[in-house]
Image (cartoon, rainbow, N blue to C red):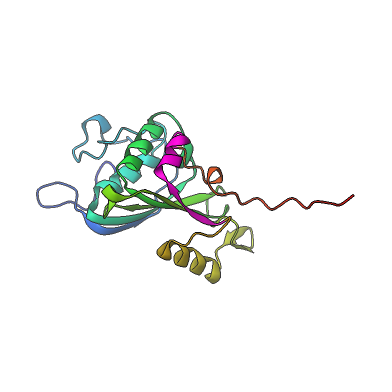
Amino acid sequence: NTLSHPHFKSTDGSLMTFDYVVANPPFSVKSWTTGFDPANDLYNRFEFGTPPTKNGDFAFLLHMLKSLKSTGKAAVILPHGVLFRRGAEAAIRIRIIKQGFVKGIISLPANLFYGTSIPACILVLDKEGAAGRKGIFLVDASKGFIKDGNKNRLRVQDIHKIVDTFTRQLETPKYSRMVPFAEIEANDFNLNLPRYIDTSDPEDLQDI
C-alpha cells in the first residue's frame, strides 16, 4: 500500500525522491486512509491539505509530489474530477496551482482503460521552474482515438500529436493552449478543460 507503507524510503526513513514519476493510481479509492492517519502522516505529504475521507485521488497525487526532487517531474493519470471538484480537493488544487507545480493537463478519450469507461487526464507536474510559471498548458486530446472492440485506443498518430504538442508547447485552436493563471483564478481555479478550449464543431448554418 503506497499510502500506508511506502516502498521507496531513504535510510533516514523519509520518502525517497526521484527525477521522474509516472503513475496510474486507482481512481477515487474510498478506503485510502486504511492503515495510517493522514492527520499525523509520517512523511508530511499533506502539507497542502488533506483529501476527503472517501476519495483518494489527491492523496496519491500529493504522495507523488512529495516523492519528487526539487527539479523532479511527474505524469499522473487521474479522473477528471480532480480538475473541478469542490471542498477539500479544491483547496489542495488551488495551493498546488499557486505553487506552480502543475505544468500541464492532457485530457484523454473516454473508455481507454479496463475496469472503467470514464475519461481520464494526465496531470503533468514539474517542480523545476515552478516559481516562474505563468500558466498551465492544456491539451484536449479527447477526440483522437480509434474504436478497438468495446474499448477506445490511442493510435500512433494520436500519441505523436500529444507528445509533439506538449513538448513544443504548440497552441492549436480547439486542441491546445497556454492558459494564464489570471484566467484560471477568474474561473475559481476550476481546471475543467471545456472552460478554456472550445472543441465544439461549428454550427452548420443553412441558408433558407
Camera-side residue of 39 and 35? 39
Does residue 6 appear left or right of residue 206 in this picture?
Answer: left
Image location (x, y in percent) of residue 7: 23, 51
Q: Nearer the viewer, residue 20 or 187?
A: 187
Q: Is residue 185 magenta?
A: yes
Q: Residue furthest right?
A: 208
Instruction: Classify residue 189 by image quadrant.
Output: top left
Q: Nearer the viewer, residue 131 or 125?
A: 131
**Image quarter of residue 47:** top left
Residue 91, percent across and down?
Answer: 36, 32
Q: Is residue 174 visible?
A: yes
Going 25% across and 29% down the picture, which residue do you hit? Answer: 39
The magenta segment is: 175-189
Is residue 132 in the magenta section?
no
In-image side of 66 versus 92 (left or right) = left
Residue located at (78% from left, 53% from top): 204
Q: How many marks?
A: 0
Is residue 139 in view from this perspective? Answer: no
How far across and down, in percent of the image, does residue 165 sit? 47, 64
Residue 151 rendering spot, x and y as whole percentages:
60, 58
The residue lying at 45 percent from left, 48 percent from top is: 179
Q: Is residue 145 above or below residue 99?
A: below
